[in-house]
Amino acid sequence: MKKILAFAVCLLTAVVAWAQTPAEIVSRMDEEMNKHESEGIIMTMEIKIPLLGTVSSQNWIRDDKFRTEFSAKGIKYICWSDGKTTWTYNGKDNEVVIENAKEDSSSGGADDAKMLTGITDGYDITLKKETADAWYFLCKKSKTNPDGDDPKKMDLVVAKGTYYPKSLSASMSGVTTTLRDIAFGVSDEDLTFDAADYPGVKIVDKRK
């Protein structure tokens, strides 16, 4: 019996030593994200607005370039941007409008991707639950966080094994934004409008 008890104590000690804190897990997630930074990120973004419902978009982001696809009332829209120029496709009219990128949207894709790194900055993280596949965290804004634009809390899910983020949800002013289905590897073709892919498309150039 003494040998069994001694073995149990050693096993428990090993388990406690191996256990990771929420901060360590999220830090490892940041490391994995940084490893793939140059590859670009692919993700689904859902925005839930009270009374209006949920809008879902698929996004390809690399550096300051991005492409966004979504549908509204059965009409498909696609937007490409290289930080200086935007190409917006309207499926109803089979038309692409080319414009100079707006200053407040030129880094939008990059900003969305950065939501998935540095989560511990300005937040207190607690583990809500753990499954065989993932950790579920609650991130509460720290009292010492001076950034008024940061949401008060976020829900973060991290995959075991890869340490990739599975989803991140945050609410502000009643609007809930969720990032999910995250993957890596964005090609130049993913980020470039090619008229050959849209037979008969009308191109309207509004650049000055």
Image: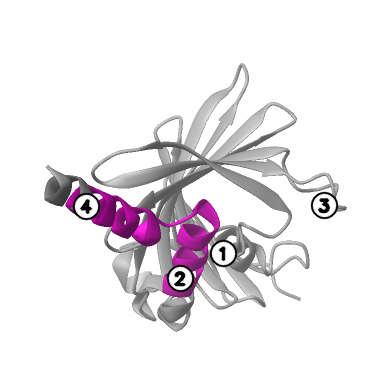
- The secondary structure type at the circle numbered 3 is loop
Q: Distance between the Cα atoms at labels 2 and 1?
A: 7 Å
How crowded is the residue under tag 4: few (<14 C-alpha within 10 Å), some, or many (20+)? few
Determine which residue is flagged by label 2: 33
Q: Nearer the viewer, residue 126 or 111?
A: 126
Determine which residue is flagged by label 3: 145
Residue in view at x 43 percent, y 67 percent: 41
Q: Sequence-wise, which precedes: disc 1 or disc 3?
A: 1
Q: Sequence-wise, which precedes: disc 2 or disc 4?
A: 4
Nearer to us of marks 4 and 1 is 4
Disc assigned to residue 208: none
Q: Position of residue 63 (x, y in %)?
A: 55, 78
What secondary structure is the stretch in magenta mostly built from?
helix
Colouring style? one colour
Residue in view at x 58 percent, y 64 percent: 109
- The secondary structure type at the circle numbered 4 is helix
Q: Are marks 2 and 1 in contact (CB under 8 Å)?
A: yes
Residue in view at x 60 percent, y 68 percent: 110
Q: Distance between the Cα atoms at labels 1 and 3?
A: 16 Å
Determine which residue is flagged by label 4: 6
The quarter of the rendered structure image containing the C terminus is bottom right
Q: Distance between the Cα atoms at labels 3 and 2?
A: 23 Å
Q: Sequence-wise, which precedes: disc 4 or disc 1?
A: 4
The quarter of the rendered structure image containing the N terminus is top left
Q: Position of residue 52 (x, y in %)?
A: 59, 22
Determine which residue is flagged by label 1: 117
Up-down: is 71 above or below 161? above
